[in-house]
Image (cartoon, coloured by chain):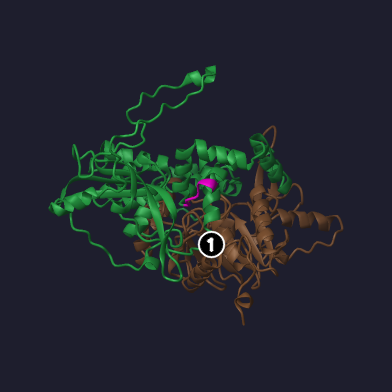
Amino acid sequence: MSLSTLTKPWAATSYGFLDASAKRELRRKMLKAIAVPGCQMPYASREVPMARGWGTGGLQVTLTLVNPASTIKVIDQGADDGVNAASIRRFISRVSGAAETWDTLDASIVQSRHRVPEETLGDRQILVLQVPNPEPLRGVEPNISIARQMHADADYGKLWLTLYEQIVRKGRIMQGAAYPSMVNGRHVMTPSPIPRWDVPKLNMARHLTFLSAGREKRLFAVPPFTRVEPLVFSDRPYRVEDHADLVCRRSGVSGYFMNELPIDGGGSAFEVSDSNLGIKAIQQAEGGEAAIGPTWYRNGEFSA
Amino acid sequence: MAYVATRGGEKAIDQAERLFRADLGTIDAGRVEAIRQSMPYLVDRVMGEASLYSEELAALALAQTGGELSEAVLVLRAWRTTQPRIAVARPVRQGELLTQRRISAAFKDIPGGQILGPTLDYSHRVLATDVLEGTPFVPPPVDAAERAAPQRQPSLADWQRAQGLVAPVDEAKVAPQDIPDLTREPLLFPASRAHRLQSLARAETGGVLALGYAAMRGYGNAHPTVNELRLAEAEVVVTHPRGTQFSAGRVRVSQAEVTSKEKGGYLELGYAATFGWNEVKVIAAATLDLNSDEAPVGSAMHEEFYLYHTESVEASGFCIHFKLPHYVTFQSVLDAMRDAKAKEPVATAPAEELQTEPAE
């Protein structure tokens, strides 16, 4: 045995960009996050060659998970061809040798900003959500030390109060995306700003979800088969966006979350937000062989 | 439509970057060297905020970002974080610094003397427009002092300690490799003193100035008196695996110690230090350090507030991320707003009635 057999040849950067000490810390924090679902784990959050707020938290988790046999899908607002999604995907594949895909069914890791794909994720897939603000209490308590104490005490009264006040003032809960949700009956998390449409997809799911905020240096997880329950009052049921009846003008699919596009002369057109689902639907309509997997929503109703 | 159409994927990204780089033109070693030589204070500022001491790499970062400071700091930090931590240098003591400038506003004169050193403090800030008319500015020669100032200066706080004016040093016995390292650990609150000072050392100069100025102007409890300000060079003394200690080189450092008033029978001290010569930053940072212990939670003088909000890479990154599309979250807001509007007559009804309304 010699030193050269124990070491690797010198390289300008480590495999997957992050060095071994950064990955070791992340793996420990990711395992802790799985062990305490929904609880925010602080981590060092190394700088990566991308600006903070542009998916650096998700990127660090993905770079820790990725291996040469991985297939990665990266979406921004549901689209694979968004400029930042393309930039992140290119970076990950360049530093890891992982394959790229747009197809949810083929991906082993899905890194996403603001959406969960419409096709059901399985137990061999990991969803990595980019999180701008990991703290569901930020709106009621900007001080992070006090907020940590409130989580420790499961003291979510102020959060309930803001939801109640919205009902009193506006007749309904006005929270748009990032709907605060109770994980495993213990920790309230923000499911990153995914629309309300996507939150039920995390509940008792077969896949593992990591949520990581690089700028705020916090990550948390929803392990498979874990309860994720939006905070609602018993007489005011949870309501997803009213998109069930909208039809995509390009692919003709309906019953999924849509992008609204203002059109000249007033009114709106809609396009399916999960852009590759739309692409596959068009390919099918044109006689192609694109396979669309089972989806969480069927005919606009959540039915997983 | 237009915004959605700007998704062009990889080609668009590639061409947008090319446009930026084309404007900057060819970057060669000569340009990097010119920046290093002509902009030492800018290079110092970038090295401090990147917490990476390399004039050459800092000048390169400035060259390749066209002087976009937050971008320059980001590329340096992203490079730095991939480098192994091969040694921990011996702590730097004030008395060992090769001091080029050292002043105190607390006393007319101090042991070791007031050393003005290089400064623009007393210059008239007149733009040298003659240079543009074709007359180069040639700096007048410096007259050597009759007696050279001593290279090393004692610490004023040590003298104050001997007089019983400043609390004795509570020196924590921490092994070098156990000193908390902000670049390898998350910042948690209350922050350790090591983390607080490290965070201030790499903080964004403008951000520290703004909040430090707010403290000085009246939002803090303590008005600073500059006890000692130093611009110096520090030997980086590391231990060879064979056990010998040697200097791996010198780095330019600034440090400021500010004081205000009595607390517990002693003068309170606030402290800050950073890579490079950056007086404004260390005075402002030391003022924040001085004020933070008594600062109300949530105030701009509280450590959680100023440490989070002076972090250059995080603040600039988050600010520019708002350029990214947010149409999914916006759609979610629109949906709730339209539904609430449709319900408006109900919403304005008395609360008692509202409670009896069916949920839909």
Label 1 sits on a secondary structure element that is strand
Query: Where is residue B39 shown, x and y percent of the image?
Result: 49, 37
Closer to us: B166 or B78: B166
Q: Is residue B333 visible?
A: no
Residue furthest top as drawn:
B133
A146 in relation to A221, above or below: above
Amino acid type, residue under disc 1 in the picture: Leu
Instruction: Indicate the chain on which mark 1 is placed.
Output: A
Residue furthest right as drawn:
A287
B230 in relation to A25, above or below: above
Residue furthest bottom as drawn:
A1
Q: Main secondary structure of the magenta part?
A: loop
The magenta stretch is B52-56
Dividing the picture into quadrants, the one containing residue B170 is bottom left
- Determine the residue positioned at 70% across, 70% down: A69
- Determine the residue positioned at 61% across, 70% down: A207
Q: Is residue A265 left or right of residue A143?
A: right
Closer to us: B56 or A188: B56
B55 in relation to A293, above or below: above
Chain letter for green, please: B
The shade of chain A is brown
Is A203 a magenta residue?
Answer: no
Residue furthest front as drawn:
B146
Q: Is residue B201 left or right of residue A174?
A: left
Q: Can residue B171 be seen in this view?
A: yes
Query: Where is residue B73 shown, x and y percent of the image?
Result: 51, 47
Closer to us: B336 or B240: B240
Quick one: label 1, few (<14), some, or many (20+) residues within 10 Å? many
Query: Where is residue A28 shown, x and y percent of the image?
Result: 50, 71
Which residue bears the numbered disc 1? Answer: A211
Quarter holding the N terminus of chain B? top right
